[in-house]
Image (cartoon, rainbow, N blue to C red):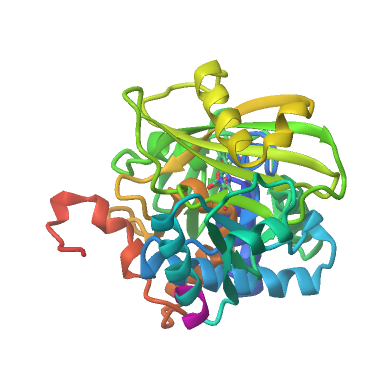
Amino acid sequence: MKTRLAVVGAGIVGTACALKLQEEGYQVTLIDAASPGCGVTAAGMGHLVALDETDQELDLCLLSLRLWNGFFKEFPGTGEVSQCGTLWVAENEAQLLEAQHRAARMNTHHWQAEALSGQQVQKLEPALRPGLAGGVRVFGDSVVYPPQIAHFMAQLLVKRGGKLLTGKRVTDITTSSLMFEDGSKLNTDLIIVAAGLDVARLLPGVAVFGRKGHLAITDRYPGRLSHQIVSMDYGQAAVTADALAVAANVQPRASGQWLIGSCRQDQQTDTSIDTNALGAVLQSAMKLLPCLAEMQIIRAWAGMRPASPDGRPIIGPHPEIPGVWLAAGHEGLGVTTAMATASLLADQIAGRPCAIDHQHYLPERLFPSLNLKYA
Ligand SMILES: Cc1cc2nc3c(=O)[nH]c(=O)nc-3n(C[C@H](O)[C@H](O)[C@H](O)COP(=O)(O)OP(=O)(O)OC[C@H]3O[C@@H](n4cnc5c(N)ncnc54)[C@H](O)[C@@H]3O)c2cc1C
């Protein structure tokens, strides 16, 4: 008989894990309090991007991006994928130097990138303001529509014999069972918890918290932008007194719309629109792409990135509850790194060596009482 495995949460992370573990031969039940892809997966940008703040981050992104490429080859057109690449824009000499380092780093990792002069940047994207210092073009990055992928993966799981339970909120997790809000219970052999922000409530001790981001989307302007444009400030932007960091990030959607981000704000408890934060996001984007001032914004919203205390995702066994595994805390990279998360979990559950060093992501680092030492 097959081993039973339940996945709590059908966001991009949970659905990727569910499908991967089904491929490994488990009898998978995927559970969501609402429906697949309706959590923060529906609120983000869907940029599949190689970020390189640390070597570990780059390794995780590249493992995932390569797995995503395989997925899109197998299921062409899923998730409105467009391999538009990323154009990182440098506004001054210091950023240009960092852009050149980024190009070198990516190429060393066999992820094609080229450093560009200001003129080359302008030629690639004429909508950018003149006078930029330069940038770096990363060829293999893509843009997707994440909720559609989560939905597709959940349906595929069912087609292949898995179970999908929607509208079922888990309230309690033990070694071999889940309790639901409606009083019912599910017995299982293994559990993967991928419940986004709710992980912290379900498993006290796993300190996932929300990091708020605002986005806005324009009407359709096809053909005016070819790459995802990101300021070299991204990840480096100064944090203001109200814990807000903003860096321009503009994405061409398949529909011809421009999706405009992004910012990060801590100490926020809900997803209501903060006009100051939204205004700062729009201003930073307009500074790079002045034509935005003439374009129609048709919707704006905010979402909460599920963040971990040290900024790294939490992937591996719960250190205190046998049989319970975690896939959480992916912050602003959960879409990008969902496939790598599934791969690392599958390898750990099977007791195989992982494709990359998985130690940085083990949940036990968040449990100081275990007295373990981590880099
Ligand atoms: C503004 C913004 C921009 C972003 N841009 C990008 C980007 O460009 N690229 C990128 O890679 N990432 C991006 N992200 C981050 C990305 O969206 C998240 O990291 C990712 O979606 C997290 O997925 P998840 O599956 O862990 O969580 P979720 O999508 O929130 O899924 C969790 C699921 O669990 C279910 N659930 C919760 N509690 C329970 C329970 N008790 N019982 C049963 N089910 C439950 C929920 O209904 C939900 O469907 C962005 C995020 C934001 C907010």
Question: In percent of the image, x 36 and y 46: which residue is there?
Answer: 308
Q: Which residues are magenta?
A: 105-109
Q: How many marks?
A: 0
Query: Does 373 appear above or below 91?
Result: below
Task: State the image quarter where residue 159 is shown.
Answer: bottom right
Closer-to-camera residue (39/325): 39
| Quarter the C terminus occupies | bottom left
Task: State the image quarter where residue 360 is shown.
Answer: bottom left
Is 141 in the magenta?
A: no
Question: What x and y, as percent, mark residue 260?
Answer: 65, 37
Query: Does 289 appear above or below 321?
Result: above
Task: State the image quarter where residue 244 is shown.
Answer: top left
Q: Main secondary structure of the magenta part?
A: helix
| Quarter the N terminus occupies | bottom right
Is 106 in the magenta?
A: yes
Question: What x and y, as percent, mark residue 339?
Answer: 58, 65
